[in-house]
Amino acid sequence: MGEGGAALWRAAGLFLALVFYGLLSAPAPAEIRPAEGMIGALLVLGVGLRRPLSVVTGQTLLEGGSPPWEAPAVLALAVLLWCPLMRGVWLDWAPGDMVRDVVPLLYLFLPVLLVPLLRAAPDRAAGLLAGGLAVAGVGFALRWWKQADWGFGAVGVRAMADGGVYLLNAPSVLFAAIALPAFGGGMLTHGGWLRRVAGVAAILGGLLCLVALAGAVHRMALGLAAMAFAALGLWWLRRAPLAVLGAGGWRCCWWRFSPMRCWGPWDRWPKKPGWPGPTPDGRRRRPRSGKPCHPRPPSCSGRGGGRSSPIRRWAAGACPTPTRS
């Protein structure tokens, strides 16, 4: 077996490690269980032992032919690994607590450890790595939705809980939310029916991750996703301007005539400071469905809600300014 074949076997082991990581483990596991042991064994199969030992001991810095970005990455890993580890040994921390902190750090610097593997089989190894990250992200999102009892209707209505192990904090969820819709869109435009089915599945998986991040109100992840989609839109605009402009026009029309302008995730945007006031002819604003966009606040109707000063009600826009006769 040549170097390319061995690299593919190692990439397959890394793919399985990432899949089991998303389905069975946690972003920062509290303890080393059999699932973490199996994932660690698969990571050793994919990465090997020589490369991690060379990186954590600094031997990589003495080797020639390294790319310019590798030296700062190795130095950052050495500082973040050895300084807290020596402090934990000095303070007599429990070994399980130190291992629990080291595992997420090694996940963070996993690209530095994968340099030889990606050099040996750049195309297929990179594809397996991206596919494993995407599947892990969808696995985390599915487990989070199961914890939330599949409450899709709560998205945009209230902030949903992250859960005990913070599954959505895994970077693979954000990666899947961005990469899967992009890959799925490419599959829909090129290839036969099998690629189109796979493209639809990829888009649905990405939307599942994106809606999960929106339900838990992960603002930083949503902002990064918005910037990524804006960059992809500009790139697609150069390649297919008519298709992008048509999709944008359809989106504007949907926003103009959709009842979601008064319900759901955009409920707070049009009139965030307070409740909608009356129309010029004295009637309350109503959407196309005939139901009011917002209920009247209790302080105006006189039923519950406690006392509220006229100044506060006027500032909220709920009631007209009281005047003295």
Image (cartoon, rainbow, N blue to C red):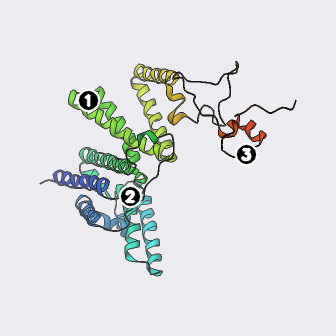
Q: Which disc is residue 220 wearing?
A: none
Q: Position of residue 88 (x, y in %)?
A: 45, 76
Q: Which disc is residue 27 wearing?
A: 2
Taking the spot 63% from the left edge, 34% from the top edge, the residue there is 296
The CA span between labels 1 and 3 is: 59 Å
Specify which label sits upstream in the sequence, 2 or 1.
2
Horizontal arrangement in the rendering, residue 94 relative to residue 188 (left or right): right
Specify which label sits upstream in the sequence, 2 or 3.
2
Q: Position of residue 33 (x, y in %)?
A: 29, 67
Q: In the orientation shown, which residue stands out farthest toward the right? A: 325
Regarding mark 3 in the picture, which secondary structure is present there? Answer: loop
Q: Which residue is label 1 attached to?
A: 196
Residue 78, located in which quarter of the rendered image?
Answer: bottom left
Regarding mark 1 in the picture, which secondary structure is present there? Answer: helix
Q: Nearer the viewer, residue 315 or 39?
A: 315
Between marks 2 and 3 in the image, the one whose residue lies nearer the viewer: 3
Q: Which disc is residue 307 wearing?
A: 3
Circle 2 Cα neighbour tier, 10 Å, few/some/many (<14 / 14–19 / ≥20): some
Q: Position of residue 32 (x, y in %)?
A: 32, 68
Horizontal arrangement in the rendering, residue 83 relative to residue 8 (left or right): right
Q: In the orientation shown, which residue stands out farthest toward the front? A: 303
The CA span between labels 2 and 1 is: 32 Å
Contact check, label 1 and label 3, Cβ < 8 Å: no
Q: Position of residue 244 (x, y in %)?
A: 43, 24
